[in-house]
Image (tube, grey):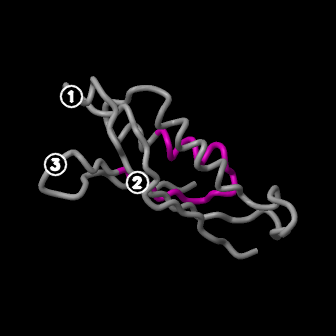
């Protein structure tokens, strides 16, 4: 069965993230982009969502990990999310994740980090 990708572009979340004083006191918007390489377990059945990897579950996992607790470093959040996605979804062979903070600096659109993790 051919592999395919599932992706999210600019999933916008309010996160409790950062080490600076103002980041410790309030949430801030982050954007998450994720691309998952998926090796389907079976042929997609147009009448059965269980025959494919339901991207609603992927979104839920990302939101849960982002909102669970305050995280000081983007690197730790990225590691947490990628670990969860690989653990919960065995058909995923690779995760490409980008977390960006659009309000970090006034002289650029965003700053962030990108992760590439595979089994």
Q: Position of residue 12 (x, y in %)?
A: 43, 49
Look at the image and give the residue range highlighted in magenta: 80-99
Residue 50, relative to residue 6: is it above or below?
above
Q: Which marked residue is nearer to the observer: mark 2 or mark 3?
A: 3
Q: Position of residue 60 (x, y in %)?
A: 60, 43
Q: Looking at the image, which residue sits at the far left? A: 107
Q: Position of residue 102 (x, y in %)?
A: 27, 51
Disc 1 and disc 3 in contact, CB within 8 angstroms:
no
Q: Quadrant of the N terminus?
A: bottom right
SS type, badge 1: helix
Which of disc 3 and disc 2 is earlier in sequence? Answer: 3
Name the residue rendered at 74%, 65% in the picture.
40
Name the residue rendered at 21%, 28% in the picture.
22
According to the picture, the residue beneath numbered tag 2 turns out to be 115
According to the picture, the residue beneath numbered tag 3 turns out to be 105
Real-space CA distance between mark 1 and mark 2, rounded to the nearest whole angstrom: 26 Å
Which of disc 2 and disc 1 is earlier in sequence? Answer: 1
Q: Is residue 73 left or right of residue 115?
A: left
Real-space CA distance between mark 2 and mark 3, rounded to the nearest whole angstrom: 21 Å
Q: Which marked residue is nearer to the observer: mark 1 or mark 2?
A: 1
């Amino acid at each position: 069965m051919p592999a395919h990708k599932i992706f999210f572009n600019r999933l916008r979340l309010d996160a409790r993230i950062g080490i600076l004083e103002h980041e410790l006191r309030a949430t801030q918007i982050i954007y998450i982009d994720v691309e998952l390489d998926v090796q389907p377990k079976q042929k997609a059945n147009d009448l059965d969502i269980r025959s494919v990897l339901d991207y609603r579950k992927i979104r839920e996992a990302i939101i849960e990990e982002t909102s669970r607790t305050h995280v000081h470093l983007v690197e730790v959040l990225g590691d947490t999310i990628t670990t969860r996605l690989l653990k919960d979804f065995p058909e995923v062979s690779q995760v490409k994740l980008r977390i960006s903070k659009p309000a970090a600096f006034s002289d650029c659109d965003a700053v962030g980090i990108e992760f590439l993790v595979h089994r």
